[in-house]
Amino acid sequence: MKADTKELRSNFEKALQLFLKSELSAYPGVKVTRNKVVIAHKESGAVATLHFEYLANTRAYEIIIFVEHPALQAEIERISPPYPSNLANPKLVYCMSTVSEKDGCPLLPVTEQGIENTCQVMLRRLQDVHLPILYNLLNVSPALVSDVIERPKYYAYPVPLIVIALKTNAIQPDDATLAKILSEQTLGYTNNQELKESFNKQLLTALN
């Protein structure tokens, strides 16, 4: 059985690499290798990595995604939040795994048709969900604000990153957006709640 699984994995991973190499060729800065997609952002030196990890216990693939962004990291250090990052690795500004996402881990396909279908499913997931989020972060786009509000736990410092995006794009948030930015979900359910609230309110007040 182990040999069968090894062969199935090898066949699928080779097919996925070739498929993604072709389909993602028009995306700026993308390089596809075995079980990995790397996006290099020349202007800022930022790098996003998407790693396809096989999970033997479920015979499925998770995608682990992380981003190093020196320019944003320097901005965050300048802001100097008095509370820790959401992420264990201090070099990262974004990190997530699709294990926690609904239907985020496609099963290892066992037929030719299954390989084709799974490649398409993974491509759609990348194009519809992950790549837009990553490019918004790499480029510090206006949409980074809503991205962080929607999934704050995956970002190192949600509110400081939002403030950087607002300043970079000369956006003045309305009251509804401000309420979302200062919501318990965006601030994080962990400790340092009062400290986060007071510091982040000061950050947002300074935008005016």
Image (cartoon, rainbow, N blue to C red):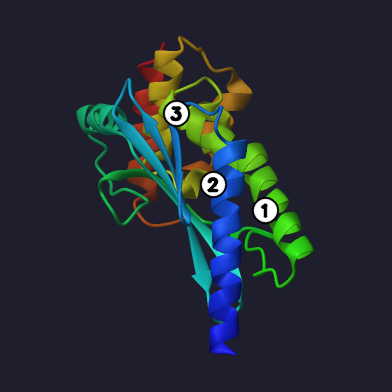
Q: Is residue 162 above or below residue 98?
A: above
Q: Are marks 3 and 1 in contact (CB under 8 Å)?
A: no
Front label number (3 vs 1): 1
| Residue at x 37%, y 45% (from the top left corner) | 194
Reading the image, the residue beneath label 1 is 119
Point out the tag, 3 or 2, that comes first from the N-terminus: 3
Q: Position of residue 77 (x, y in %)?
A: 21, 33
Point out the tag, 2 or 1, that comes first from the N-terminus: 1
Task: Pick the quarter of the image with the N terminus.
Answer: bottom right
Instruction: Give the class, few, some or many, for how many residues have Cα within 10 Å of label 1's Cα (few <14, many ≥20).
Output: many
| Residue at x 44%, y 28% (from the top left corner) | 162
Total marks in image: 3
Residue type marked 3: Ile
Q: Are marks 2 and 1 in contact (CB under 8 Å)?
A: no
Reading the image, the residue beneath label 3 is 162
In whole angstroms, how far apart are the C-alphas of marks 2 and 1?
34 Å
Front label number (3 vs 2): 3
Q: For mark 3, give the secondary structure.
A: helix
Reading the image, the residue beneath label 2 is 185
Task: Pick the quarter of the image with the C terminus.
Answer: top left
- The one of 124 and 110 positioned closer to us in this rendering: 110
In whole angstroms, how far apart are the C-alphas of marks 3 and 1?
34 Å
92 displayed left or right of 30: left
| Residue at x 74%, y 69% (from the top left corner) | 111
Instruction: Give the class, few, some or many, for how many residues have Cα within 10 Å of label 3's Cα (few <14, many ≥20).
Output: many
Q: For mark 1, give the secondary structure.
A: helix
75 displayed left or right of 143: left
Point out the tag, 3 or 1, that comes first from the N-terminus: 1
| Residue at x 40%, y 15% (from the top left corner) | 167
Residue type marked 2: Gln
